[in-house]
Amino acid sequence: MRFHPVGPGQARAHAAPVPANMKRISSLFPLIIVALLAAASFWLEYVVRNESQSGLGKGRHDPDAIVNNFQVDRFDISGKLSSRLTAKKLTHYPDDDTADIETPHITFLHESRNMEFRSEQAHADNRQRTVLLFGKVRGERPATADSAAQTLDTDELTVWVDDEIARTPQPVLFTHGKNRVEAVGADWNNLTGMLNLHSSVQATLPPKSTTH
């Protein structure tokens, strides 16, 4: 906007006429906005409907939760702590109710028998109630009054958390005190305390000490 100074007695006010085409555009402007909004709504509905029909939305495997440095405790019907899961990081995926876990540590706690498992990574399936451990997997059972400490080392191990059973088809190294046993495949049941080695079993047993 510009202002032009004029001399005395020369001041005039002129109202410039509005062109007819500008009047028509001004009257049509609200209708244009409504039309654009309607077109945008239609396009959004079209995209969502086609994603649903084609399965694109359902096929996404995006996380809905990421938790760092967490701990999950489970209790039995009497209120006693029965198991614990700790890890550095958990990433949950809602499409299949699974989770990727970094540095998991699973512990089963009982009055007469405890067992724990560690690994570098894990994949948990909540529908199957399993945790697949992989990467330097180690299972441990501490020594008791009746038994020496036990360890199980392997590359991959599936743990059924409700049944407290661990199973692997991979080669394993099992130690019981000074005894060493190598095998291919194993089942380890914490509730019964039984270890079942599947095949190719080779044991190294130190000689028993003799007294004179």
Image (cartoon, rainbow, N blue to C red):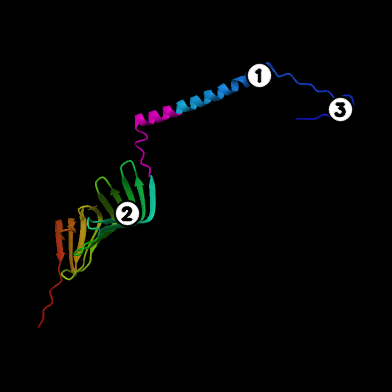
Distance from disc 1 to disc 2, alpha carbons, whole Å, reads 69 Å
From the image, state whether disc 1 or disc 2 is nearer to you. 1
Q: Position of residue 157 (x, y in %)?
A: 24, 54
Q: Residues within 10 Å of mark 3 (few under 14, many from 20)?
A: few
SS for callout 1: helix
Q: Residues within 10 Å of mark 2 (few under 14, many from 20)?
A: many
Distance from disc 3 to disc 2, alpha carbons, whole Å, reads 85 Å
Q: Is residue 24 magenta?
A: no
Residue on which the image places disc 3:
6
Residue on which the image places disc 2:
121
Name the residue located 55 percent from the left edge and 25 percent from the top edge: 33
From the image, state whether disc 3 or disc 2 is nearer to you. 3
Report the side of 201 relative to 83 (left or right).
left
Report the magenta residues as a range: 44-63
Residue on which the image places disc 1:
23
Q: Quadrant of the N terminus?
A: top right
Name the residue located 66 percent from the left edge and 19 percent from the top edge: 22
Name the residue located 49 percent from the left edge and 27 percent from the top edge: 40
The quarter of the picture where residue 23 lies is: top right
Residue 119 visible, this orientation:
no
Q: Position of residue 34 (x, y in %)?
A: 53, 24
SS for callout 2: strand
